[in-house]
Amino acid sequence: MTGLSTLDAVALMVFGLAWATYHFAIERDGGKSLNHVMNGYRVRWMLEMAERDQRMVDSSIMSTLQNGTAFFASTSLLAMGGTITILRSTDDVQRIFSDLPLGLVASRGLWEMKVIGLLLIFGYAFFKFSWSYRLFNYAAVLIGATPPKSAPDAQARRATALRAAQMNIVAGKHFTRGQRAFFFALAYMGWFLGPYFFMATTGAVLVVMWLRQYASDASRAVTDIEDPDIA
């Protein structure tokens, strides 16, 4: 038996509902979220790229995006390794928690279920980051395949640039999903302190993530100035 109480089950459902709701709300948002606005700039970037003869700047930007994605993929693997270590040291960790003045010592089954859940979150993040890295590689190939400005077929050049933009958007979407998993992993860790902490950390992470999309300095930086070509 896992020892999962009714309150634990409710907290876990709140967590899952919060993640799913945020996921669908952000990804189907067609308005002023930071992600949506930046997708417009990705299209603008690729169209500008198609009009340049020298694309060293674009290659440098793509390299930066790929390196950042690789870093997070590696971090996901390290997090998975640390979580597996915790799972193998259940008895030692439970003894440490029993000495804390919180009175929140979970049963062995419940503790292992919590750790396995955290491991699954980091595993999901790894797959998202690794796939995003591959998609950024594809976007780089499409940039290389974009005909030069001097090519006579302007329509083919624009079409290839738009394909590169769409691939870049999809890569960014999967990268964002991986980062979202990291943020919700922080919320999930509240469960180790109890179901009330779990619901509180879930709510806090949800609010912070929403503010970053709609009411942050970064959001205002790209939405305060209207541009009909990007909106």
Image (cartoon, grey):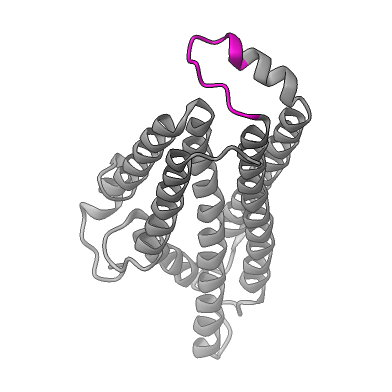
Name the one closer to the observer, 67 or 18. Answer: 18
Which SS does the magenta portion mostly show? loop
Q: Image quadrant of residue 56?
A: bottom right
Residue 33 location in percent, x, y? 31, 57
Name the one closer to the observer, 148 or 30. Answer: 30
Quadrant occupied by the N terminus: top right
Residue name at image x 29 percent, y 43 percent = 211
Horizontal side of residue 87 vs 188, given as left or right? right
Residue 4 location in percent, x, y? 55, 40
Magenta range is 97-107
Name the one closer to the observer, 211 or 102. Answer: 102
Image: 210 above or below 147: above
Residue 110 location in percent, x, y? 61, 36
Q: Is residue 50 magenta?
A: no
Residue 167 location in percent, x, y? 57, 70
Give the tally of numbered discs: 0
Residue name at image x 59 percent, y 62 percent = 55
Q: Is residue 98 magenta?
A: yes
Quadrant occupied by the C terminus: bottom left
Image: 91 above or below 7: above
Image: 172 above or below 78: below
Residue name at image x 63 percent, y 61 percent = 136
